[in-house]
Image: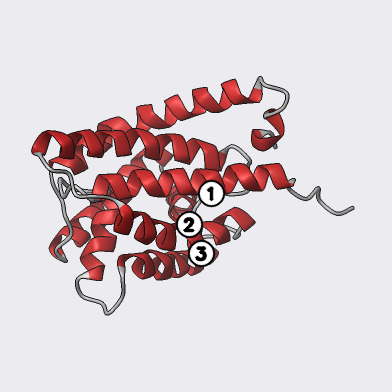
Amino acid sequence: MLARLPTWQRFVCFFLGLLVMSMGNAMMIKPGLGAPSWDILHLGLAKHLPLSLGSVILWLGVVILFINLFLDVRPSIGLCLNVLFVGPLMQWILALLPMPATPVMAWVMFISGTIICGIGISLYISPKLGSGPRDGMMLGLSQRLKLPVGVTKYGIDLVVSLIGWRLGGPLGLGSLVTVFLVGPAVQFGHYLVRRIATVPALAPFVAA
């Protein structure tokens, strides 16, 4: 028997989540206060490669996808769509965002972006179409090394942050802020998704 195909509503929720998450990431990058761990690496690589930031995110995602195969992490439809769309979406949104006029507005944009990113992550995870390539690598390494997922995540974040910083990526105070805020933001996003699931007309968009 063929597996049940995802409904169009779940794809809508997935792509909305990717868009919201990409907007949040762009809002964290734009003020120049630092960036999340993987974006430190993306921005560092973009300084040394003849590629835009969006292209760096896309092609690094492809590389990680192949690494995941060696870690026995099977590619899902969500993983492949994440690889294809997140980079271009972030590049497009970054071009539209204005630069904050004052330090206070810069921090408002950065913290708002952190919260928006967490909500986006919850939205794109909720239809259960698959995690992103970087999350897949985290889970694969955790199983291969027999380490808790949390330990593996912080280890990967530290390594990619330091590599990105050495390449010229923006490791700053904002990077530290994301360590403490992204988790609660994702939890808040999960709460919103659960509330959406209680509305009959909206439940198909988030239910697996």
Q: Residue at x 14, y 63 (%)?
A: 168
Q: Quadrant of residue 100?
A: top left
Mark 3: few/some/many CA within 10 Å (<14, 14-19, 20+): some
Q: CA distance from mark 1 to mark 3?
A: 13 Å
Read off the residue under disc 1: 131
Depth check, front residue: 185 or 161: 185
Mark 1 vs mark 3: give the one in front.
3
**Image quarter (top left, top right, bottom left or bottom right) of the C terminus:** top right
Q: How is the image coloured?
A: secondary structure
Horizontal side, residue 29 vs residue 126: left or right = left
Residue 153: in sight, yes or no?
Answer: yes
Q: Which mark is residue 13?
A: none
Q: CA distance from mark 2 to mark 3?
A: 11 Å
* Mark 1 element type: loop
Name the spot of residue 132 as percent of width and height, x first: 49, 52
* Amino acid, disc 3: Leu
Q: Which mark is residue 84?
A: 3
Name the spot of residue 104 as percent of width and height, x first: 12, 33
Q: Are marks 2 and 3 in contact (CB under 8 Å)?
A: no
* Mark 3 element type: helix
Q: Which mark is residue 133?
A: 2
Depth check, front residue: 128 or 51: 51
* Amino acid, disc 2: Pro
Label 2 vs 3, first from the N-terminus: 3
Q: Are marks 1 and 3 in contact (CB under 8 Å)?
A: no
